[in-house]
């Protein structure tokens, strides 16, 4: 329910409402105007072009490993279904169901949610689901970092707005959470894990910061979209990055809580 609520708020505020769409576009313009001045744009775009291949290879390796290890296709099938559902629903939402009102900000056409972000998040989530329990403490931060860097890259390269990227994380996390819940019923994913409350605290903090970003996006000045001062432009650029990171963090930690499972035992 948390992921669905965050997605609905993202779409309502940053796409349907004028003030939210303005703030989203201001962040997008700040990065798209600054980043091309550097020499890093082409390498990052090349990385994004190769992203589907990278994601496919990573997902294939972990699927093959799990099938060989378990001698069963059950976990792999459930994981693949969740990835296909995440990618398919992202495209359907973007092209068929959701629309973006034109407030004359240069935002014609709907790009919400981001397909590139969904692809990276889905492959990394699949890697986390398919990894053995002992490796999950290592796999999760690596997977989260890869997906988050991809999301940030699509923003600074001018491919997607912050809300597009956040929505890509949320849609993918929802399907992976459903897959994890199914696997917890038919083939438990979790063994004993160290008792820790860090993920709950970090997750709560990320949601609070995410909510604060929405509040600031509404309260900060909204001058003409082509006449934003440099200090305000920098502020929205920072808000855009924070928006992407907090949405990714909240999505990843919700998935982690389901993968570990409600009935896990704790090592003392």
Image (cartoon, rainbow, N blue to C red):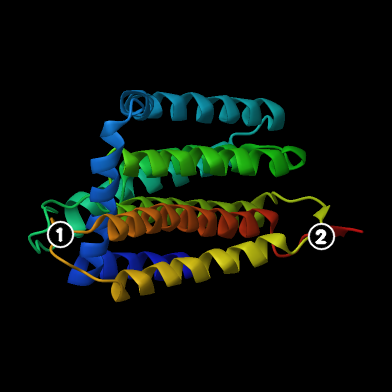
- Extreme residue toward the right, this view: 268
**Do residues under tags 1 and 2 come within 8 Å of each other at their CB atoms?**
no
Q: In terms of image quadrants, where is residue 155? A: top left
Tally the marks.
Answer: 2
Nearest the eye: 74 or 92: 92
Specify the label residue 248 is tagged with: none
Q: What element carries label 1?
A: loop
Nearest the eye: 165 or 183: 165
Rendered location of residue 210, percent (x, y) = 45, 66
Rendered location of residue 200, percent (x, y) = 66, 65
Mark 1 or mark 2, earlier in chain: 2
Q: In terms of image quadrants, where is residue 23? A: bottom left
Label 2: few (<14), some (14–19) or many (≥20) C-alpha neighbours in 10 Å? few
Instruction: Examine the rendering and report whether any part of residue 262 can be seen.
Output: yes
Rendered location of residue 45, percent (x, y) = 32, 28
Residue displayed at 36% across by 27% down:
40
Residue displayed at 70% across by 51% down:
188
Residue displayed at 16% across by 60% down:
100
Q: Is mark 2 on a helix, strand or loop?
A: loop
Instruction: Examine the rendering and report whether any part of residue 80 can be seen.
Output: no
Rendered location of residue 237, percent (x, y) = 34, 53
Q: In which quarter of the image is the C terminus?
A: bottom right
User: Which residue does the numbered mark 1 point to in the structure image?
Assistant: 225
State left or right for residue 142 relative to residue 14. right
Mark 1 → mark 2, Cα distance in angstroms: 49 Å
Nearest the eye: 56 or 218: 218
Specify the label residue 195 is tagged with: 2
Viewer-side label of 1, 2: 1
Nearest the eye: 223 or 156: 223
State left or right for residue 195 relative to residue 127. right
Residue displayed at 46% across by 40% down:
149
């Amino acid at each position: 329910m948390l992921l669905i609520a965050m997605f609905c708020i993202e779409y309502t505020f940053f796409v349907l409402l004028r003030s939210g769409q303005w703030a989203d576009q201001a962040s997008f313009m700040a990065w798209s105007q600054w980043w091309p001045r550097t020499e890093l744009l082409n390498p990052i775009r090349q990385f994004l072009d190769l992203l589907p291949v990278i994601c496919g290879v990573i997902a294939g390796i972990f699927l093959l490993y799990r099938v060989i290890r378990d001698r069963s296709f059950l976990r792999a099938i459930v994981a693949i279904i969740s990835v296909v559902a995440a990618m398919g629903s992202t495209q359907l939402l973007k092209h068929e169901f959701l629309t973006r009102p034109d407030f004359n900000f240069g935002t014609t056409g709907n790009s919400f949610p981001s397909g590139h972000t969904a692809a990276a998040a889905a492959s990394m989530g699949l890697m986390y689901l398919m990894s053995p329990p002992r490796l999950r403490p290592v796999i999760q931060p690596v997977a989260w970092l890869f997906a988050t860097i991809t999301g940030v890259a699509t923003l600074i390269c001018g491919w997607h707005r912050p809300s597009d990227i956040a929505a890509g994380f949320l849609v993918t996390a929802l399907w992976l959470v459903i897959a994890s819940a199914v696997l917890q019923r038919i083939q438990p994913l979790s063994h004993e894990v160290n008792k820790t409350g860090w993920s709950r605290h970090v997750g709560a903090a990320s949601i609070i910061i995410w909510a604060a970003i929405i509040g600031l996006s509404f309260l900060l000045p909204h001058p003409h979209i082509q006449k934003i001062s440099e200090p305000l432009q920098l502020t929205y650029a920072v808000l855009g990055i924070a928006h992407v990171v907090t949405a990714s963090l909240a999505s990843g930690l919700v998935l982690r809580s389901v993968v570990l499972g409600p009935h896990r035992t704790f090592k003392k």
